[in-house]
Image (cartoon, rainbow, N blue to C red):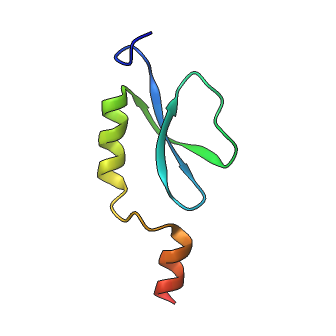
């Protein structure tokens, strides 16, 4: 299956770090589906839209305290 035909999903972990994962595979431990599925390019575009602060959640919280 080519990457144009492969369906992906946007996933994130507890530190609010984003990635993409194959839609037809079980999610790896520690990751949950964000809700977006589509082509690789669509999923990467979604990540670019929502992941504006690359710092892990724990670091953002520590700096805000």
Q: Determine the residue located farthest toward the right in the rendered image.
A: 29
Image x and y of residue 23, in percent: 53, 26
Instruction: Give me the residue at 53% from left, 49% from top.
Output: 12
Above or below, comparing residue 62 to residue 32 in the picture: below
Asked which quadrant contains residue 7, the reply is: top left
Q: Nearer the viewer, residue 28 or 10?
A: 28
Image x and y of residue 39, in percent: 36, 25
Image x and y of residue 64, in percent: 47, 86
Instruction: Give me the residue at 60% from left, 45% from top.
Output: 32
Q: Quadrant of the N terminus?
A: top left
17 to the left or right of 25: left
Instruction: Give me the residue at 52% from left, 90% from top.
Output: 65
Above or below, comparing residue 63 to residue 9 in the picture: below
61 to the left or right of 28: left
Above or below, comparing residue 61 to residue 53 in the picture: below
Q: Determine the residue located farthest toward the bottom in the rendered image.
A: 65
Q: Determine the residue located farthest toward the front in the rendered image.
A: 2
Instruction: Give me the residue at 70% from left, 44% from top.
Output: 29
Report the number of numbered marks: 0
Image x and y of residue 6, in percent: 43, 18
């Amino acid at each position: 299956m080519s990457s144009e035909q492969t369906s992906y999903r946007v996933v994130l972990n507890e530190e609010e770090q984003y990635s993409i994962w194959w839609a037809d595979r079980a999610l790896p431990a520690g990751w949950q589906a964000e809700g977006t599925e589509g082509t690789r390019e669509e999923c990467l575009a979604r990540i670019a839209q929502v992941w504006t602060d690359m710092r892990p959640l724990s670091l953002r919280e520590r700096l805000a305290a």
